[in-house]
Amino acid sequence: MKIKDNSILKNIAGEYVILPLNSYAVSLDVILKTNEVGAFIYNSLKDDLTYDELFKLVYDEFEVDAKTLDKDLHEFINSLRKKGLLDD
């Protein structure tokens, strides 16, 4: 899976937001707020990765237990899919 080219990640006043782009404008109805982990995942998905590869990258980078990471990672990936930001 890989992030599509139709979005950008910005740090605005200490908050990370993923801004989907439509033509030359930002589509405000699908802005996704995230944290440092979400920003790391987004940036990691600029490369085409499997779920297992992504899981390992996040697990190695952050102190989190595997069960919590699995749940949260699935939720974040599903959010990206629902907003049309992810190529599978």
Image: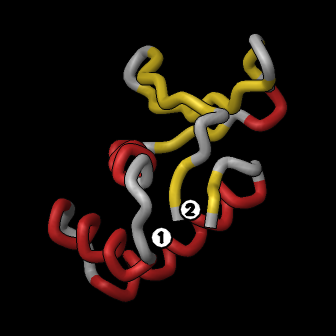
Q: Which residue in the protein does label 2 denote? A: 76
Task: Tell whether 64 sits left or right of 27.
Answer: left
SS under mark 1: helix
- Where does residue 59 sit, x and y in percent of width and height? 24, 72
The three-letter amino acid code for the residue at tag 1 is Leu
Q: Is residue 28 left or right of residue 4?
A: right
Q: Secondary structure at mark 2?
A: helix
Look at the image and tell me whether residue 38 can be seen: no
Frontmost residue, 69 versus 20? 20
- Give the answer, above or below, for where 57 lies relative to 13: below
Q: Mark 1 = which residue? A: 73
Residue 34 x, y percent position in the rendering: 50, 43
Q: Is residue 79 left or right of residue 44?
A: right
Q: Position of residue 19 (x, y in %)?
A: 63, 29
Tell me the residue at 77%/13% (across/down). Answer: 25
Residue for point 45% across, 28% down? 15
Check the image and name the residue furthest to the right: 29
Q: Is residue 71 left or right of residue 64?
A: right
Q: Residues within 10 Å of mark 1 (few under 14, many from 20)?
A: some
Q: Is residue 40 visible?
A: yes
Determine the image quadrant of residue 86.
bottom right
Res 11 quadrant in image: top left
Quarter holding the C terminus is bottom right
Q: Nearer the viewer, residue 34 or 81?
A: 81
* Amino acid type, label 2: Phe
Q: 64 or 1, which lies in front?
A: 1
**In the rendered structure, are the residues bearing label 2 and label 1 in contact, judged by CB atoms less than 8 Å apart?**
yes
Distance (Cα) linking label 2 and label 1: 5 Å
The spot of residue 12 in percent (x, y) is 46, 17
Count neighbours of disc 2 (C-alpha within 10 A) and say few if under 14, some if 14 to 19, many if 20 or more.
Answer: some
